[in-house]
Amino acid sequence: VAARGEDWLACLPFFYVLGSFQCGWADLYSKILQHPHVVSSKPRGNTGTNFYFEKRPWDSFIGPLSRDAGLVMKEPDKNIIGEASGGSLTFTWTHSERLHRAFDEEMRRCWRHCKETIEPYDEQRRCIDVGCYKSSQEAHRAEWALLGPLTLPALVYAVHGDAHKLRLLSILRNPADRLWASFVVYGHYAKHYGDGEEGFLKWFREAANEFGRCSEEYSLRHCALYFESLSKRNEQVFYHCDQLIKGMYSVFVEDWLAFFPDGQLLVIQFEEYIQHPTPALARVFDHLGLDDLPSDALKTIANSRSALEIGDDPRIGRSLSAQTRLEVESFYAPFNAKLAQQLRDPRFLWR
């Protein structure tokens, strides 16, 4: 690659860990990096570049990878590099920032127009709350018509070109436990709705009702991908049903499988990973085409110091009462059934 007046070698990742928060993605990535033929630089903390869904420059993504390219070339038939980002599997509107530029630009333009040219206040608010959402959605649809489906899997596929060798990994947790963990970890929910299960249920029921209303007006998929962009009412829902939607794994996995079929995506069940880390990690290394490690070496990596974050703690979910768990799991049951079908694995029913 020629850049800044000099030539340098750059490589795209051979694999991505498609993270979903409160599901242990950072711990999985930290253990993958311990295989001797994974030569990616160790991440700073547990945050990936987030290049695909945040508005970050190309150099912020390819720069660190270029530093690893020389290590790949030492054993090009064996050495690989990868990347991991926390919100990439479930690419909600919040985690697709790079992909709705036209919407954002039109919303800013329209908002300024309404504020600067329209009086009285009620007419100004109507201009923003109705007119700006409508014109911004039209701008987004026009960009889609020009460029094709703007989703995270589509962008990854476009960047890689011939992507049939690319390997994708994810780790998913019972969505009821994941939702409860997000309530525990992110204090603004308890502050807004109240502590404990009572506050959790109030939050869950409000989010489920608002999402159901949205789905009736638009569609389930449309609301999962674009919730807060669809209307002022949706935008005013506390944190936009974001955490509820992130547990609807099947909606997003459908897109990943559409672009990366034929075994390119391996999904590990979080509960299996916690209870039986060594065989789970062996499956991961096999998926990446890495050399088998001696059993002692594999076990050492699997049981190495945990990089689990607070919200990944498997003990959090155990504090849910049976009645609350049943209500939340009933909501997610159709999504889990679809996921199990997509992955041809009944373990993702979480029964």
Image (cartoon, rainbow, N blue to C red):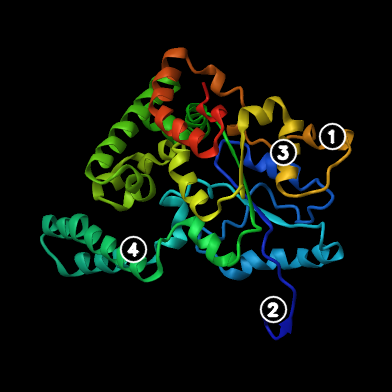
Q: Which numbered disc flags the more N-terminal residue, 1 or 2?
A: 2
Q: Which numbered disc flags the more N-terminal residue, 1 or 4?
A: 4
What residue does disc 2 label?
1
What residue does disc 4 label?
103
Amino acid type for the residue under numbered disc 3: Arg
Amino acid type for the residue under numbered disc 4: Phe
Residue that appears at 22% across and 59% down: 134
* 7 relative position to 201: left or right: right
For marks 3 and 4, give the CA distance: 41 Å
For mark 1, give the secondary structure. helix
Question: Is label 3 or label 4 in front?
Answer: 3
- Where residue 229 sits: x, y (%)? 32, 53
Question: Is label 2 or label 3 in front?
Answer: 3
Question: Is label 4 or label 2 in front?
Answer: 2
For marks 1 and 4, give the CA distance: 48 Å
Which of these two is toward me, 151 or 208? 151
